[in-house]
Amino acid sequence: MAGKRMVLEIGMGTDIRGQDYTKAAVRALRDALWHNSLTITRALGVDIDSMRVHITIGVPHPELVDKAQVLAVLPHGTGEVTVVEGGLEIPTEDGTGATVMAHAAAIVRLDI
Protein backbone atom coordinates (compact mmCIF):
# COMPACT_ATOMS: atom_id res chain seq x y z
CA MET A 1 0.00 0.00 0.00
CA ALA A 2 1.54 3.29 -1.12
CA GLY A 3 0.98 6.62 0.51
CA LYS A 4 1.91 8.21 3.79
CA ARG A 5 0.40 6.81 6.96
CA MET A 6 -1.69 9.61 8.41
CA VAL A 7 -4.04 8.06 10.96
CA LEU A 8 -4.38 4.94 13.10
CA GLU A 9 -7.83 4.29 14.52
CA ILE A 10 -8.59 1.39 16.87
CA GLY A 11 -11.81 -0.10 18.14
CA MET A 12 -13.52 -3.02 19.82
CA GLY A 13 -16.84 -4.70 19.06
CA THR A 14 -18.81 -7.60 20.46
CA ASP A 15 -21.63 -9.95 19.70
CA ILE A 16 -22.95 -10.81 23.15
CA ARG A 17 -25.14 -13.82 22.41
CA GLY A 18 -25.09 -14.71 18.73
CA GLN A 19 -21.47 -15.77 18.18
CA ASP A 20 -21.57 -13.73 14.96
CA TYR A 21 -17.96 -12.91 14.12
CA THR A 22 -18.89 -10.56 11.29
CA LYS A 23 -21.24 -8.57 13.52
CA ALA A 24 -18.50 -8.18 16.13
CA ALA A 25 -15.98 -7.16 13.44
CA VAL A 26 -18.33 -4.57 11.94
CA ARG A 27 -18.99 -3.13 15.40
CA ALA A 28 -15.25 -2.96 16.09
CA LEU A 29 -14.59 -1.00 12.91
CA ARG A 30 -17.52 1.33 13.60
CA ASP A 31 -16.13 1.90 17.09
CA ALA A 32 -12.79 2.86 15.56
CA LEU A 33 -14.22 5.16 12.90
CA TRP A 34 -17.23 6.76 14.54
CA HIS A 35 -15.26 8.38 17.36
CA ASN A 36 -13.31 10.53 14.92
CA SER A 37 -13.87 13.29 12.45
CA LEU A 38 -11.01 13.30 10.00
CA THR A 39 -10.38 16.81 8.80
CA ILE A 40 -6.89 16.03 7.55
CA THR A 41 -7.98 15.74 3.91
CA ARG A 42 -9.54 19.19 3.99
CA ALA A 43 -6.47 20.62 5.73
CA LEU A 44 -4.21 19.12 3.05
CA GLY A 45 -6.52 20.07 0.18
CA VAL A 46 -7.06 16.51 -1.03
CA ASP A 47 -10.28 14.69 -1.86
CA ILE A 48 -11.65 12.71 1.10
CA ASP A 49 -12.27 9.72 -1.17
CA SER A 50 -8.56 9.55 -2.00
CA MET A 51 -7.97 7.93 1.40
CA ARG A 52 -6.83 4.32 1.32
CA VAL A 53 -7.70 2.41 4.46
CA HIS A 54 -6.11 -0.85 5.56
CA ILE A 55 -8.34 -2.59 8.08
CA THR A 56 -7.09 -5.38 10.32
CA ILE A 57 -9.63 -7.34 12.33
CA GLY A 58 -8.65 -9.72 15.13
CA VAL A 59 -11.08 -12.51 16.09
CA PRO A 60 -10.62 -16.07 17.37
CA HIS A 61 -11.89 -17.60 14.08
CA PRO A 62 -10.85 -15.34 11.18
CA GLU A 63 -12.51 -17.55 8.58
CA LEU A 64 -15.95 -16.68 10.02
CA VAL A 65 -15.73 -12.95 9.14
CA ASP A 66 -17.35 -11.67 5.93
CA LYS A 67 -14.76 -9.15 4.73
CA ALA A 68 -17.19 -7.48 2.33
CA GLN A 69 -19.54 -6.56 5.18
CA VAL A 70 -16.64 -5.08 7.15
CA LEU A 71 -15.42 -3.10 4.14
CA ALA A 72 -18.94 -1.74 3.56
CA VAL A 73 -18.61 0.23 6.84
CA LEU A 74 -16.09 2.67 5.30
CA PRO A 75 -17.82 6.01 4.66
CA HIS A 76 -15.05 7.38 2.40
CA GLY A 77 -12.09 6.18 0.40
CA THR A 78 -11.16 2.69 -0.62
CA GLY A 79 -10.02 -0.12 1.59
CA GLU A 80 -8.86 -3.63 2.11
CA VAL A 81 -9.57 -5.98 4.98
CA THR A 82 -7.24 -8.51 6.61
CA VAL A 83 -8.60 -10.78 9.32
CA VAL A 84 -6.18 -12.36 11.77
CA GLU A 85 -6.42 -14.54 14.83
CA GLY A 86 -7.01 -12.42 17.92
CA GLY A 87 -9.87 -11.02 19.97
CA LEU A 88 -11.69 -13.16 22.51
CA GLU A 89 -14.38 -15.77 22.74
CA ILE A 90 -15.88 -15.90 26.22
CA PRO A 91 -17.97 -19.06 26.81
CA THR A 92 -21.29 -18.84 28.60
CA GLU A 93 -21.47 -20.37 32.03
CA ASP A 94 -23.40 -23.41 30.75
CA GLY A 95 -21.05 -23.82 27.76
CA THR A 96 -23.83 -23.57 25.15
CA GLY A 97 -22.70 -20.28 23.64
CA ALA A 98 -20.16 -17.51 23.78
CA THR A 99 -19.62 -13.77 23.56
CA VAL A 100 -17.32 -12.80 20.70
CA MET A 101 -15.00 -9.81 20.99
CA ALA A 102 -13.32 -8.40 17.90
CA HIS A 103 -10.59 -5.78 17.66
CA ALA A 104 -10.12 -3.45 14.70
CA ALA A 105 -7.26 -1.28 13.49
CA ALA A 106 -7.75 1.08 10.57
CA ILE A 107 -4.70 2.72 9.01
CA VAL A 108 -5.49 5.66 6.76
CA ARG A 109 -2.97 6.55 4.06
CA LEU A 110 -2.84 9.51 1.69
CA ASP A 111 -0.62 10.43 -1.22
CA ILE A 112 0.83 13.80 -0.25
Image (cartoon, rainbow, N blue to C red):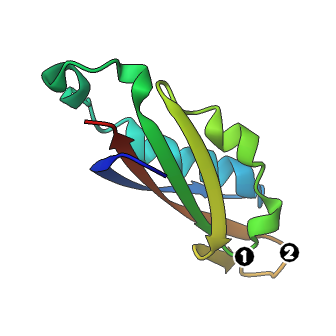
Answer yes or no: is residue 15 visible: no
User: Is 36 situated above or below 98?
Assistant: above
User: Is 12 situated above or below 34?
Assistant: below
At which x and y percent is residue 49? 43, 22
Crowdedness near tag 1: few (<14), some (14–19) or many (≥20) residues, C-alpha within 10 Å:
few
- 36 lies left or right of 76: left
Residue of label 1: 92
What's the residue at 37%, 44% (across, down)? Answer: 108
The kind of residue on which mark 1 rests is Thr
Residue of label 2: 96
**In 3D space, how far apart are the residues under numbered discs 1 and 2 (Cα atoms)?**
6 Å
Give the secondary structure at mark 1: loop
Give the secondary structure at mark 2: loop
Front position in the image: 28 or 79:
79
Residue 37: image quadrant is top left
Q: Furthest residue to the right?
A: 96
Q: Are marks 1 and 2 in contact (CB under 8 Å)?
A: yes
